[in-house]
Amino acid sequence: MASQEIENLASALARLPGLGPRSARRAVLWLVKRRETALEQLLVAIGEVKDKLVECPVCGNIDTRAPCGICADHRRDARSICVVEDVSDLWALDRAKLFTGKYHVLGGRLSALDGVRPEDLTIGTLLERVREGGVDEIVLAMNATLEGQTTAHYIAERLEDLPVRVTQLAHGLPVGGELDYLDEGTLAQALRARRPVG
Ligand SMILES: [Zn+2]
């Protein structure tokens, strides 16, 4: 029977995606055995991330600096902005290394069921970024879910009067598919085959 502190650590780890109670216990045991090395490194790494995490004021990405590494990278094409629902989608797309522009994180998707309205998302900031000029293309990279597509249509409508080309990911994306879970090949293909909206 483990002490309360060890139990607490195990149940905190068990809440991580992909870890259940059993693997959490194995991880705790592994860490306890390496308290001078791996546990210490993990503590330092978590502490540093926790202290420095900020939401990028430009795109909504989470990084340890603001503006984030992507917004600050001048080699990336600022004329093209890829709009995603969540930070996890941004990271998934960026791992695929095919999109060389910038991003915009909405912070969710429109949902009548969950009471998410346009003003709850960063659509206003997106429109501002386009109005400021220098943007040629908006790539809508919403999930292939009903709510994701409703959100994409709504944003496309709001962008209609602005001088910008609006495209969206080709839906070779599986129906109900969440970007975060797709392999990089599927993502890359969807991005390459993006097409005009409407
Ligand atoms: Zn950013």
Image (cartoon, grey):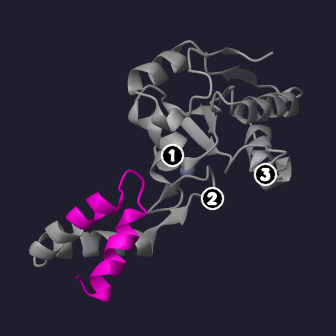
Question: Does the magenta stretch mainly form a helix, a strand or a loop?
Answer: helix
Mark 2 against mark 1, which lies toward the viewer?
1
Q: In whole angstroms, how far apart are the C-alphas of marks 2 and 1?
A: 17 Å
Give the residue pinned by disc 3: 114
Query: Label 1 neighbourhood size at 10 Å, few (<14), some (14-19), many (20+)?
Result: some
**Which x, y percent locates residue 157?**
87, 29
The residue type indicated by label 3 comes to Asp
Secondary structure of the residue carrying numbered label 3: loop
The answer to whether any part of residue 57 appears in the image is yes
Give the residue at the far front of this rendering: 1
| Residue 122 located within the stretch drawn in magenta | no
Check mark 2 vs ligand 1: CB closer than 8 Å? yes or no: yes
Stretch in magenta: 1-26
First reached walking from the N terminus: tag 2 or tag 1: 2
Question: Which quarter of the picture shows residue 46?
Answer: bottom left
Image side of residue 104 versus residue 19, left or right: right
Q: Are dots 2 and 1 in contact, CB under 8 Å?
A: no
Check mark 3 vs ligand 1: CB closer than 8 Å? yes or no: no
Q: In whole angstroms, how far apart are the C-alphas of marks 1 and 3?
A: 20 Å
Give the residue pinned by disc 2: 57
**Which x, y percent locates residue 57?**
63, 58
**Label ID, residue 18:** none
Give the residue pinned by disc 1: 88
Secondary structure of the residue carrying numbered label 1: helix
| Residue 7 located within the stretch drawn in magenta | yes
The residue type indicated by label 1 comes to Ser
The quadrant of the rendering that contains the N terminus is: bottom left
Q: Are dots 1 and 3 in contact, CB under 8 Å?
A: no
